[in-house]
Amino acid sequence: AQSVTQPDIHITVSEGASLELRCNYSYGATPYLFWYVQSPGQGLQLLLKYFSGDTLVQGIKGFEAEFKRSQSSFNLRKPSVHWSDAAEYFCAVAPYNNNDMRFGAGTRLTVKP
Amino acid sequence: DTAVSQTPKYLVTQMGNDKSIKCEQNLGHDTMYWYKQDSKKFLKIMFSYNNKELIINETVPNRFSPKSPDKAHLNLHINSLELGDSAVYFCASSPGTYNEQFFGPGTRLTVL
């Protein structure tokens, strides 16, 4: 069955520490891949996306993600977390076109001072 | 300028009532969507519209009906509201396939 998995429901990191949020997908072919961030009480904002080409993609707010076909993963990273990064992060995939976008369950990030 | 806007932001109503949520995008996008986010933050697509044609209709109760008067608007009508309809509803738009979706701020619906 097609699925998007974010294994970590909640992650806590200290401000200034590095961050990696995991995302795995299960689809027949390489889908289009996205990471969105949702701040409390807000809508979703796109951080970055991967369609093709370079497997390391840069996004806004200092985030990057790496697509690994062999692992069916698209993990999100940031070298140094800021307190304002505390939010809910969603991985999303669109297997054939954008109209069928599926979201993972989300990872809530808490940043300790 | 707000790209994707929704009204109202909060909606509290009684079971059995009929309500509507409005969505407007000023991005000139061709496709608009409605998502439901439950209390556990799980996002599920409900509908998408492309040039006034329904593209996706997930297994959503027929009490929910999208209405698109023009390309810039996609309203969500809900009849006979139930407790389980309580959630945050997000509208989104996209310039077309193979592009990201732009989300509105959400409408928190509470059914009492």
Image: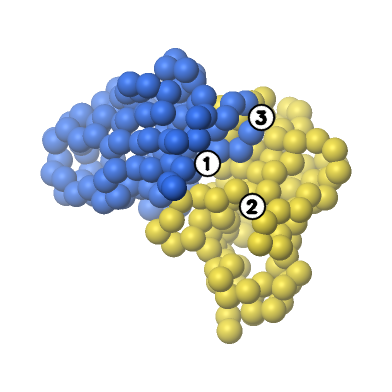
Chain colours: A yellow, B blue
Q: Which residue is mark 3?
A: B98
The quadrant where residue A77 appears:
bottom right
Looking at the rendered structure, whether the residues under marks 1 and 2 are on a common chain is answered as no
Say what amino acid the circle numbered 3 marks.
Tyr
Question: Mark 3 — on which chain does it sit?
Answer: B
Q: Are marks 2 and 3 in contact (CB under 8 Å)?
A: no
Circle on res. B78: none
Residue A62: x %, y % from top left? 71, 63
Name which residue type carries label 1.
Answer: Phe
Q: CA distance from mark 2 to mark 3?
A: 16 Å
Query: A25 or B107, which is in the foreground?
Result: B107
Question: Is the C terminus of chain A in the top left, top right, bottom left or bottom right quadrant?
Answer: bottom right
Q: Using the numbered discs, state the Cα–Cα distance from disc 1 to disc 2 in whole angstroms.
A: 11 Å
Crowd class of label 2 (few under 14; some 14 to 19; many from 20; radius 10 Å): many
Q: Secondary structure at mark 2?
A: strand
- Residue B13: quarter of image: top left
Label 3 and label 1: CA atoms lie apart by: 13 Å
Along the line of sight, which residue is nearer the eye, A110 or B29? B29
Residue name at image x 59 percent, y 67 percent: A85
In this rendering, do the residues under marks 3 and 1 share a single chain? Answer: yes
Residue with the mark numbered 2: A47
Say left or right for B27 vs B76: right
From the image, tell me which residue sits under label 1.
B102
Query: Is there CB contact under 8 Å for labels 3 and 1?
Result: no
Q: Which quadrant is home to the N terminus of chain A?
A: top right
- Residue at position x 69%, y 79% in the image: A16
Residue A4 placement: quadrant = top right
The image position of residue A79, as x and y in percent, is: 76, 69
Q: Label 2 marks which chain's residue?
A: A
